[in-house]
Image (spheres, rainbow, N blue to C red):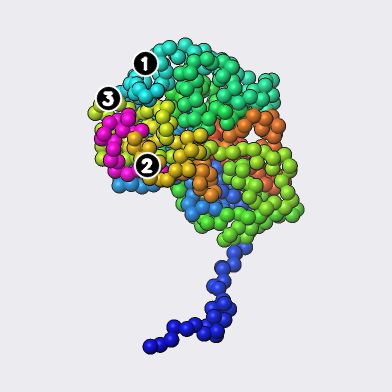
């Protein structure tokens, strides 16, 4: 019988065996380098290329799209990230790019009744009733209306491009939205309505963001009121998925987009900026960084970022969010005269709405687990979350919701290079204390991303506009 003993020579050979060498990163020279291939970075790169200048985009992930992600399924698609438009005319820059790429917009017209689950009861109500989309009990309606009018007054005090400079900025930024709510509302039911809307639109609870931050978001929606933002959200989306816009822009850029290449270091010397990434070393004359603020702290900077900018980046957290996509063979809830929209006060879900294709080839719902609920449920297993989600859907739609065709969850808080499908929020004191460092360039480095947008911040439109503004600044420096 042959011996199985390993000889000393074999051990030494194993220890000294050379590992395959990593492919050395290539050195590339361009006019403008862009960090991040989301909507903002790609929109910036697109404008640079249109100007006749050379550009290169470095993306950490293995895909483009940033906080948008669309997954094909049968003849439809599943959205895992940013998806909805509020106003097609106002969100014009995003629509313009979509049209150039021949990507259409689906206008949704919900028909039937909405649902909300409150204190163990499932309530059915008409979206076109006196309270509109809001899940308000008759007793809470006057208080919610009065609070909304008071909030609109505060919103008008905020300049969206420089919210920290408004006449009441310090007052608004010294309190959370929850503090403002508690000071002006009494009814538990009325507070629940406000909390649910805030969690749905921002991914955060009212205690997580300052009143100034919330006012800034609405003030930057080009004249829309907070009520209009709520009513119009989710009525328009892109045919083929939101990520199709990033994919389309990336195709036109071709090999100018390098994936799987996180930027580790940015070094400025005179008129030259050197970016060191996993797959390429890029020497540029100007740089656009189009990633969430907190991710900029992962880059080794030389010279260092100004202290105010570093402090800002450390103070703008992203929401804890699970994006849930559920599909059925048919949108059976239509048969019951329901729109598919549900607001929950029981966990894990907070909100669900219908995203069924116009031809109804599938029945599709999208839902969210946000904020404190997401922090609690992230400690549970995927099987437990799935069971809880299904229970929520069965509560709303009956036993036909028990066996979906698919159920996908996207835990954005656990993705390394995005951390959320929503925007970074500004807690109390951050905008007035550090906001002025949000947009100014760092030498030959310019900032993009939806957080730095002067209008439509926290949206896909804001991301595009921020990218366009950064491209102008970068080109002016060449």
Q: Nearer the viewer, mark 2 or mark 1?
A: 2
Circle 2 sits on which residue? 386
Residue 279 in percent (x, y) is at: 57, 61
> Would residue 419 be seen by someone viewing this image from the given angle?
yes
Determine the secondary structure under disc 3.
Answer: loop
Circle 1 sits on which residue? 129
Circle 3 sits on which residue? 337
Q: Is residue 425 above or below residue 291?
A: above
Name the residue at 40% across, 23% down. 119
Give yes or no for residue 395 being in the magenta stretch.
yes
- Marks 3 and 2, how far apart in space? 26 Å
Q: Which residues are magenta?
A: 392-410
User: Do the residues bearing badges 2 and 1 touch, measured as CB atoms within 8 Å?
Assistant: no
Q: Earlier in the sequence, mark 2 or mark 1?
A: 1
Name the residue at 52% across, 56% down. 260
Name the residue at 52% across, 12% down. 146
Q: Earlier in the sequence, mark 3 or mark 2?
A: 3
Residue 325 in percent (x, y) is at: 38, 40
């Amino acid at each position: 019988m042959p011996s199985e003993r390993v000889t000393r020579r074999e051990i030494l050979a194993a220890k000294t065996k050379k590992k395959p060498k990593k492919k050395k990163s290539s050195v590339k020279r361009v006019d403008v380098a862009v960090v991040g291939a989301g909507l903002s970075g790609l929109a910036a790169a697109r404008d640079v290329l249109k100007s006749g200048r050379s550009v290169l985009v470095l993306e950490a992930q293995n895909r483009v799209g940033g906080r948008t992600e669309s997954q094909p399924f049968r003849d439809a698609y599943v959205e895992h990230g940013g998806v909805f438009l509020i106003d097609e005319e106002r969100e014009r820059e995003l629509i313009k790019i979509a049209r150039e790429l021949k990507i259409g917009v689906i206008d949704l017209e919900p028909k039937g009744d909405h649902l909300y689950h409150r204190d163990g009861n499932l309530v059915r109500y008409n979206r076109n009733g006196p309270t509109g989309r809001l899940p308000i009990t008759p007793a809470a309606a006057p208080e919610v209306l009065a609070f909304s009018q008071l909030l609109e007054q505060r919103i008008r005090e905020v300049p969206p491009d420089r919210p920290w400079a408004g006449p009441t900025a310090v007052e608004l930024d010294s309190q959370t939205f929850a503090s403002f709510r508690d000071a002006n509302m009494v009814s538990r039911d009325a507070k629940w309505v406000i909390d649910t809307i805030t969690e749905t639109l921002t991914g955060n609870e009212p205690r997580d963001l300052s009143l100034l931050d919330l006012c800034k978001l609405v003030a930057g929606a080009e004249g829309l009121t907070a009520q209009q933002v709520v009513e119009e959200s989710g009525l328009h989306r892109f045919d083929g998925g939101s990520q199709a816009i990033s994919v389309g822009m990336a195709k036109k850029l071709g090999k100018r987009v390098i994936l799987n290449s996180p930027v580790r270091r940015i070094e400025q010397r005179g008129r030259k900026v050197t970016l060191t990434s996993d797959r390429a070393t890029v020497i540029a004359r100007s740089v656009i960084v189009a990633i969430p603020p907190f991710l900029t702290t992962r880059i080794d900077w030389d010279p260092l970022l100004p202290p105010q900018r570093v402090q800002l980046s450390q103070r703008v957290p992203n929401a804890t969010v699970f994006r849930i996509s559920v599909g059925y063979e048919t949108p059976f809830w239509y048969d019951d005269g329901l729109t598919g929209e549900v607001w929950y006060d029981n966990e894990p879900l907070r909100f669900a709405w219908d995203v069924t294709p116009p031809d109804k080839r599938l029945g599709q719902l999208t839902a969210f687990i946000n904020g404190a609920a997401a922090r609690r449920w992230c400690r549970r297993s995927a099987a437990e979350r799935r069971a809880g989600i299904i229970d929520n859907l069965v509560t709303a739609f009956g036993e036909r919701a028990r066996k979906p065709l698919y159920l996908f969850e996207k835990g954005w808080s656990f993705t390394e290079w995005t951390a959320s499908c929503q925007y970074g929020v500004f807690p109390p004191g951050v905008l007035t204390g550090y906001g002025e460092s949000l947009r100014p360039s760092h030498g030959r480095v310019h900032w993009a991303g939806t957080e730095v947008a002067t209008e439509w911040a926290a949206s896909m439109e804001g991301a595009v506009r921020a990218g366009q503004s950064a491209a102008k600044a970068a080109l002016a420096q060449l």
